[in-house]
Structure formats: structure tokens, C-alpha cells
Image: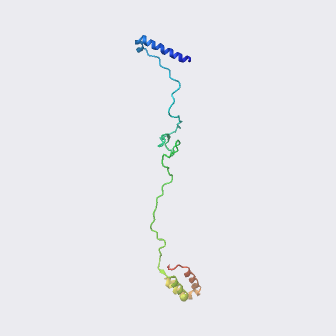
Amino acid sequence: MSVSLKKKTVETAVQTADDEIYPQAAQTVPRPAQEADPVPPPSTQPETAQPAYRGRTKFCKHCGQVIAAEAVICVHCGCQVEELKTSAAVQPIIINNNNVVGVPQGKMKNKWVAFFLCLFFGVLGVHRFYEGKIFTGILYLCSGGLATVGVFIDLIIILCKPNPYYV
């Protein structure tokens, strides 16, 4: 046995004997305080070093650890604790239902009628009158279809148009 343990045992025995002999003194005389055990009892939780956050803090919703208030993901468990903040403003969705693409403008004309009018009466400009182009029809009538060069160009242009076409 060590010396300190023997000393404690002797002091306890003397104190107990004194209490039996002098019961009144035991009630009035304070006993010396017991020395604290220098080794603390083992804790049930492992000691984790809590990071010292400056400013505001909050608790993780999943593991309960202290994290910074601005944190989106917990540094302890890796779970997402808040929705991600987007820096760009949310763009409004614009629905444009007035699609008029492909709607023909003007009067519908048949490609083959214009082609045969140009082939047989092109020098007179009849195909231009058919399309509703009065000024060029008069010009073709006075110039002989621009000396038949204009008639030849119009035949190629009419053949390249879809049937029906709009003017």
C-alpha cells in the first residue's frame, strides 16, 4: 500500500473513533473536506473539438452540431441544411401564343397558270396583270416584255415558286 492510502485509512479510523467517543463534537466540528480525485470519471461521449465560429451560429438539422449561420452544408455530417441561394434573379417565363408564322399574306395564285400566261403572253405582260402588278404589266406591254429578257427571267422565277404562292 502506498503511504497516502495508509494515511487516509488512519485518518478515517481516527475520525470514526472520535465520533463514537464525542458524539456532540461530531455534530459541531466540521470535518475536513475529502480530497478530490485527480482523475475525472470517463465520459460517455467522445470529446470533439468544436470549431469556434465568429458571429452567428446555428445547429445542424441532422446531427445537431454547431455550424456557422451562413453554412448551407454541415461540416460535420455533410448534409445540406438549407436551400442553395442563387445570385441571379429568377427569369420570368413569357408565353407567346400569337404565332402567325406560315400564315399567308396576300392573294393566292396558281403557279402553273402564271407560268403558261408568261410563256404564251409574256411579251404583253399578261402574267404581271394576273399577279396584280399593274405597273410592271404596263411596262412589259409597252416594252415588249423588256425585249423578252424580262419574260425569260420571269419564267425561271415562276418555276422556282411553290404552288400555290401568294402575292
Q: Picture coordinates of residue 32 (x, y %)?
A: 47, 17
In this view, the residue farthest toward the top is: 21
Q: Where's the N terminus, which quadrant? A: top right
- Is 52 or 121 nearer to us in this picture? 52
Residue 143 seen in render: no
In this view, the residue farthest toward the front is: 1
Quadrant of the rendered image containing residue 155: bottom right
Quadrant of the rendered image containing residue 145: bottom right
Q: Picture coordinates of residue 122 (x, y %)?
A: 55, 87
Q: Picture coordinates of residue 33 (x, y %)?
A: 47, 19
Q: Is 47 situated above or below 60? A: above
Residue ID at (54%, 84%): 115
- Is 150 or 118 nearer to us in this picture? 118
Q: How many marks?
A: 0
Residue 4 seen in render: yes
Specify how the rendered protein is coloured.
rainbow
Residue ID at (53%, 86%): 116
Left or right: 145 as drawn, with respect to 22:
right
Q: Picture coordinates of residue 159 (x, y %)?
A: 56, 81
Residue ID at (54%, 89%): 120
Q: Is 108 situated above or below 1? A: below
- Is 134 or 92 nearer to us in this picture? 92
